[in-house]
Amino acid sequence: MTSLSPSRPRLHLIGGVLLVLWLLALLIGPELLQAAGFAFNPHGHTQLHAHGHPFADARVLWGLPNAMDVLSNLPLAVAGVAGLWAMSSHRVSLETGWALRVLFFGLLLSGLGSAWYHSMPSPSGLVLDRIGMAVAFAGALSLAVAERVGPRPAAAVLGLTLLTALVSAVLPLTHSNVLPWAVVQFGGVALIVWAACLRPVAGAIGVRLGALIALYALAKALEMGDAAVFQATGEWISGHSLKHVAAALAAWPVLVAIQRLPLRQNPAARR
């Protein structure tokens, strides 16, 4: 049997705090943002560039608008497919398997949704982009809990995060409320950082959570430095395009861990 980490009570406390923060953001998010002086932009960004898009690189290549921001999503889709393919040939426990499937399916969905959004930026397209991110994020949180706390809490985290993240992805469009999405994103990262400080439980597949966090931090830094990177590279590539690549690389420590797992037994080999 898989042993459970004694950190479960702390997980309950952290999860409870995050849930309360999310509920507060859900109920009074717009009022809090307005009181803090933040103006809501339906595009999800504080300003647009002179060319009319929220990202620095708006070049058209081969007739494709915002081509680099669109094409740079290909690694995300490839990472999702590679992960699902790897799982088909390696044995994984039930709870960890669900976390991994949701993570990789989310990466695939995020690549497709983000490519769609960047090809024609709009509030509704941003919802599709965030839905993919929400699914991938739920899988990542559940995987971190499965690795460092235990399989049963991981299943609960997966269901709760999927629900709150998907609702949060839609709220900016339907209720002009971006605060729940911020709580899901940054609160979830805080939970993964906490999990990374714990020892792996028995039955963990050995994902290096530190590498996962570092790559996520790199992706956020590139996103924030979108225009600065674009200028520094002589307008060759933008920070946002590189952000997609860095986010796709976050699948690497997970794929490495899966490759170390035993192979599934081939039914044909028993004949």
Image (cartoon, rainbow, N blue to C red):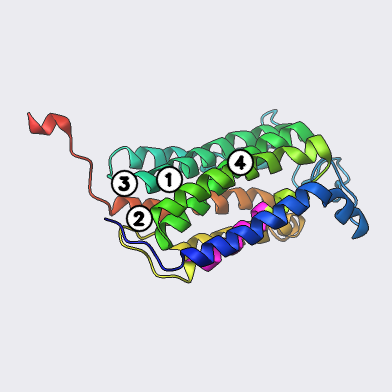
The amino acid on which the numbered mark 1 sits, given as a three-letter code, is: Leu
Task: Give the side of residue 139 with respect to residue 22, left or right.
Answer: left
* Nearer to the camera, 101 or 164: 164
Q: Nearer the viewer, mark 2 or mark 1?
A: 1
Residue 154 visible within the image:
yes
Residue 246 is inside the magenta segment? no
Cα separation between marks 1 and 3:
9 Å
The amino acid on which the numbered mark 4 sits, given as a three-letter code, is: Leu
- Per the image, the residue denoted by label 2 is 257
* Residues packed near mark 4 inside 10 Å, few (<14), some (14 to 19) or many (20 plus): some
Q: Quadrant of the C terminus?
A: top left
Cα separation between marks 3 and 4:
24 Å
Q: Earlier in the sequence, mark 1 or mark 3?
A: 3
Q: What residue is shown at x 73% (from left), y 55% (from top)? A: 226
Residue 236 visible within the image:
no
- Per the image, the residue denoted by label 4 is 163
| SS for callout 1 | helix
Q: Earlier in the sequence, mark 3 or mark 4?
A: 3
Q: What residue is shown at x 42% (from left), y 63% (from top)? A: 148
- Per the image, the residue denoted by label 1 is 100
Q: From the top left corner, tell me how far across and down residue 269 is, in percent.
A: 11, 33
- Per the image, the residue denoted by label 3 is 92
Q: What residue is shown at x 77% (from left), y 53% (from top)? A: 24
Tag 2 and tag 3, C-beta contact below 8 Å? no
* Nearer to the camera, 248 or 58: 248
Cα separation between marks 4 and 1:
17 Å
Tag 1 and tag 3, C-beta contact below 8 Å? yes
